[in-house]
Amino acid sequence: MESDERNQIEQHYQPLVEAIVERWAIGKPPNPSPFSTSSKPSGYFRLRDYLLNYLVTHQAFPAGVHAMPEGRDIQGNIEPSFPIDFNEILKGFTLPK
């Protein structure tokens, strides 16, 4: 996929991905790290990036449980993988045409 095409597809899905991840984040505590530069919960950015990449690659929602990849915090410490049940967090969302 050409980078211009990928960028257009990412822009197309970005608002949807942000809405899904924001709803997932409701009620979750902010990342507890004193070095965190965001008030988002731990895993927020990994989920956002994973879902956007999945949509761009497959042009479809993921289904079932997927393991989010390990991440690194601002200090380079490993943040563990965690499961996401896409059947649950995608309820009520549809792909834009």
Image: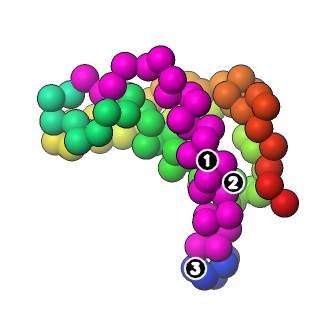
Q: Looking at the rendering, which quadrant does residue 81 occupy?
A: top left
Which residue type does callout 3 highlight? Answer: Ser
Q: Is residue 45 left or right of residue 52?
A: left
**Quadrant including the N terminus:** bottom right
Check the image and report above or below for 14 versus 48. below
Check the image and report above or below for 35 versus 57. above
How far apart are labels 3 and 2 at the CA level?
Answer: 15 Å
Which residue type does callout 1 highlight? Answer: Val
SS at circle 2:
helix
Q: Earlier in the sequence, mark 3 or mark 2?
A: 3
Magenta segment: does it hold 84? no
Residue 55 is marked as 2
How far apart are labels 2 and 1 at the CA level?
Answer: 9 Å
Which residue type does callout 2 highlight? Answer: Leu
Residue assigned mark 1: 17
Q: Report crowding for label 1: few under 14, some 14 to 19, many 20 or more residues within 10 A (C-alpha).
A: many
Residue drawn at point x = 44 percent, y = 19 percent: 28
SS at circle 3:
helix
